Each structure stands twice: as structure tokens, then as C-alpha cells.
Amino acid sequence: TLPQPLDQYTEASAEAELKKLRAQVNQYREAYYTKDAPLVEDYVYDAAYNDLQTLEKKFPQLITPDSPTQLVGDETLPGFTKVRHAIPMLSMGDVFSVDELKTFDDRLQKAVGAAVTYNAELKIDGLALSLVYQQGKLVQASTRGDGVIGEDVTANIKTIKAVPQTLPQPLDVEVRGECYMPISSFGKLNADRESRGEAVFANPRNAAAGSLRQLNPRITKERDLSVWLYTIVKAQDYGITTQADALRTLGEWGFPVNPNGRVCRTLAEVDQYIDDMTPQRQTLDYGIDGIVLKVNDLDLQDQLGNTVKVPRWEIAYKFPPEMARTVVHKITWTV
Ligand code: NAD
């Protein structure tokens, strides 16, 4: 969707275009990440971001360290205590077709020199969360923020029933996952807000972010939030060797774990997973915007490492833009 074909850009015209695109993408990001009130649908943002990335790829000398392609999320909100993540909370690369998944898989196979086994999971449309336990007690919860510095939301998280305050063993551990608002609760919340003349949330993801990032935890408590956990930081320290094992262990420790994870040994199995999960989007009571493929072997993940922004061992396949949910109205006949 660039205004002119890629090969017609000169360095000067590319620089001018990049400036415009960065301003546009930054405006979308601020509304989405800082204000929890997006200006446009995700696919519009994704298209602008993709243009930016495409042009930067053609002219890598024009990449600036403050370009949105180099940054995770956004700044933290004022008023919150800041938390420094010992291990950064990164973003994720994304693709929009099965062909691009094949390119991803080919690249990994080449890097590893063998076939790669993946753990496929649903991509939950919420906000990333870190939970720190000491001696099995929840001591700190934080948002991703800009990836290095997040917001301390411990008091807010303690109001969410699904989050265990204590683990079955006195472990020191950090786990990560997604905080979300069930779609049914989002509908009720917006209906209530509308009846009170308050602004409604654009979607369940923004409702979850806006409800968790409240300075008054009493407001969070009134909102119906839940979590799915999917990461144990430094999982190998607990004798865990694969992502599938990490999910199983999180379940044993009492965390909600999404039941739809599946080990895929071939791309055909990944295709099947996508085919099986895509229709679920219409029926699940939480938002999903794609699937995530993660290298299942944790040592291999470490070996592949990260770029400044994304892990090299995982990728999101994003679903096509969603059609409006079908709302079935009940018709009451009066005789
Ligand atoms: P992302 O949200 O696409 O991917 C990274 C995140 O995925 C992680 O931080 C984690 O929170 C989440 N996630 C969900 N399920 C997961 C799982 N099973 N395993 C691991 N992680 C999982 O990346 P991003 O850089 O935070 O944001 C980009 C997204 O935000 C895009 O979807 C984009 O469309 C949207 N966005 C929209 C606007 C807008 O204006 N509409 C603006 C900015 C960003």
C-alpha cells in the first residue's frame, strides 16, 4: 500500500516517506498503547507498520533507533511505580500467510540444520503480564511497557481471582502470560458504560488494558479480568526442557493455561492447527488474533536468541481482519 512501487524510491524520497509513515504509526501506537483507545482497526495499523518495515528493509541505512520497528510497546503511564524487567518482555514477529510461515520455518531449519518441532498456541488478544513469586508468594505483577520498563500493577492483579496468590511449592519464579477480558464481560461493561453516558471501549483488548492500568485497584476489581499463562522465565532452572512441558508445569502450579496448545512436527501439522483454530475465533469467549508458533525445545530457543525487538524462535500468524461478530437478536412475538 505504499503510494509508489518500492523500486521507484530514491534514498531522498524514501526518507521523506519514512518520516510520514513513522509519524502515522507513532500516532496509532500512542492511542493504542498509552491511551488504550485505538484510532484505527489493527489491520490498518498492521498495513502502515508493514509499509514502514518494507521501506526500511530496502533502505536499511535509513533505520533510526527510535523507529517504531525498533521499539516494543510504549512508555509507561505516569502515576505507576516503574518495574525493570530483568529479562526484556519482547514483541513478536508476525506473518499473514502460510507461505510466510514456510519462509520462517525454512530460515530456522537452515540455522539449526535439522527439522524443527513447534508448540503452536492461540495468540490471545490481551496485554502481556509478568508475575514474580518469591518463596511461592506473589510479590510483583507488571505490564510489558516498553519491554524493559513496565508498570507495577501488583495491587490490581491481586483482585483477579484466576491469578494464584500462592504456589503449591515455595518457588522463586517469574511467569508471563496474557491478561484478558472475556468477550461476554466486555459486552456487559460497554452496555453499562453506555447507559451511564461514559465512553465505551473499542474492543476487549483495550477494555482489559484500560481496566488493569488503573491507579485505583478498586476499579480493576469491579471489572471481569482473567489470565492465561504461557511462559516460565528461565524454565530450564526448574528442569523443564520444552515449551509444551512449561505449559503443563504452569497448569500444575495452579495457573490458568489455555487448553489449545499443540505440538506440531511438520508445517502440514501447523496448517491443520490453523484450520482447526480459525473457526474457534467465532465461538471462544476471549479474543484471539492469530496463532503463535514457538520452537518447542527451550535450549534451541536460547541458541536462536532475539533481535532488538522480537525472539527469532517464535512467530505469530495473524488471522485475516475479522468480520463483525454475528449478533443473534431474539425476537419476541406478542400475540
Ligand atoms: P503483538 O501483540 O502482536 O505480539 C506480542 C504479544 O503477543 C506478546 O507481548 C504477548 O502479550 C502476546 N501473546 C498473546 N498470546 C501469546 C502466546 N500464546 N505466546 C506469547 N505471546 C502471546 O505485538 P506488539 O508489538 O505488542 O503489538 C502489535 C499488535 O498490536 C498488532 O496486533 C497490532 O495490530 C496491534 N496494534 C494496533 C494498533 C492500532 O492502532 N489498532 C496500534 C499498535 C499496535
Image (cartoon, grey):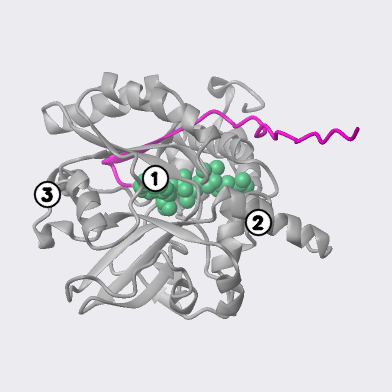
Q: Give the amino acid at mark 1.
A: Met
Q: What residue span does the magenta drawing correspond to?
A: 311-335
Please state, as top left, top right, bottom left or bottom right, where the N terminus lies in the image: top right
Q: Is residue 188 left or right of residue 226?
A: right
> Compared with residue 239, is residue 278 higher up or lower down, i.e. above or below?
above
Q: Give the amino acid at mark 3.
A: Thr
Q: State the image coordinates of residue 171 (x, y, percent, origin top left).
A: 18, 73
Q: Is residue 178 left or right of residue 261?
A: right
Q: Nearer the viewer, residue 302 or 191?
A: 191
The residue tagged 3 is 241
* Res. 92 mark: 1
Q: Secondary structure at mark 3?
A: loop
Is residue 197 found inside the magenta-colored segment of the image?
A: no
* Res. 133 mark: none
Mark 2, Cα crowd under 10 Å, few <14 / some 14-19 / many 20+, is some
**Residue in view at x 47 percent, y 79 percent:** 155
Determine whether the beta carbon of the residue marked 1 sits less than 8 angstroms from the nearest atom of ligand 1. yes
Determine whether the beta carbon of the residue marked 2 sits less than 8 angstroms from the nearest atom of ligand 1. yes
